[in-house]
Image (tube, rainbow, N blue to C red):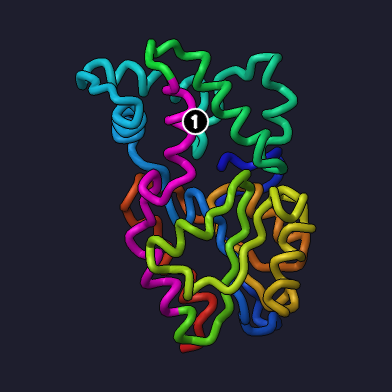
Amino acid sequence: MPDHAEPPHASRGAVRPSASRRPVEAVLFDFHGTLAQVEEPHDWVTAAATACGVTLERMRVTALADRLLTAGRAGGPLPARVPPRLAELWADRDLYEHAHRGAYTGLAETVDAGIDGFAAALYERVLVPEGWVPYSDTATTLAALRHAGVKVAVVSNIGFDIRPHFAAWGLDALVDAYALSYEVGRCKPDPGIFLRACGMLGVDPERALMVGDTPADAGAVRAGCAVLVLPCADPGRSNGLGAVLDLAVRH
């Protein structure tokens, strides 16, 4: 999900462990944009329409997708404008399930598609594993960390449970803990959510590496973690996740 307020001073790149830093015992991963990406917009719109019993022509799918992306989609991009009636839900979207659903369904409803239940169907796609695509090197990276004895947590600003997604992808056995903002009550870049993840793993923050794709993920520095910020990539593509192994696995 789009991260909450991001510190303006944070920049992309890696904050690497110094020579005096202790070995990495745990890696904390962001979810969206780091381990997985939402499905392509055309697939998203087509699947939602199909769930409503409607088959759309390709040109209409393209037009709706463009308008819906401008309105704001769960998984990004951020809305061009948040209607005043949705402001409170939007502010709380990553802290409460009802706010997350209400905010993104409300944004979708600003686009008149003429399809009954369409906004709700669009939101339902984010709740199911089929609405997401793990990056091509997610499974191999997580498996390599498990083989090396490095603990893994997923730390995400999100308003719903993503554990079923990992189970469906066969990756649940490779994740030791989930620090999800709506469960923890803290959103990145608040250091509290990173500290909670480290506590779940039983690891000192100075022995943890946070991996993400936004400056909000770099907020882990304030919790004492090292940070690696990777570029966001299109669904199914590689985003350079394998670089984590150079920092976290002893050779």
Task: Indicate the quadrant where residue 167 lies.
Answer: bottom left
Which residue is nearer to you in this view: 198 or 214? 198
Q: Looking at the image, can residue 16 be seen? A: no
**In magenta segment, residue 143:** yes
> Residue 55: x and y, percent?
23, 23
Which residue is nearer to you in this view: 86 or 219? 86
Magenta stretch mostly in which secondary structure?
A: helix
Query: Magenta segment range?
Result: 117-144
**Crowding near pointer 1: few (<14 within 10 Å), some, many (20+)?**
many
Rendered-image quadrant of the N terminus: top right
> Residue 64: x and y, percent?
35, 18
- Three-letter amino acid code at the position of disc 1: Arg
Position of 113 relative to 185 (above/below):
above
Q: How many marks?
A: 1
**In magenta segment, residue 18:** no
Which residue is nearer to you in this view: 78 or 47? 47
> Residue 97: x and y, percent?
65, 41
Residue beneath the point at 50% across and 22% down: 108
Residue beneath the point at 49% across and 30% down: 73
Q: Tell me if 211 is positioned left or right of 88 in this view.
A: left
Q: Looking at the image, can residue 166 be seen? A: yes
- Secondary structure at numbered mark 1: loop
Q: Tell me if 167 is positioned left or right of 163 in this view.
A: left
Residue pointed to by mark 1: 73
Task: Indicate the quadrant where residue 19 lies.
Answer: bottom right
Residue beneath the point at 62% across and 81% down: 25
Position of 73 relative to 206 (above/below):
above
Which residue is nearer to you in this view: 187 or 12? 187
Residue beneath the point at 48% across and 55% down: 34
Position of 30 relative to 90 (above/below):
below
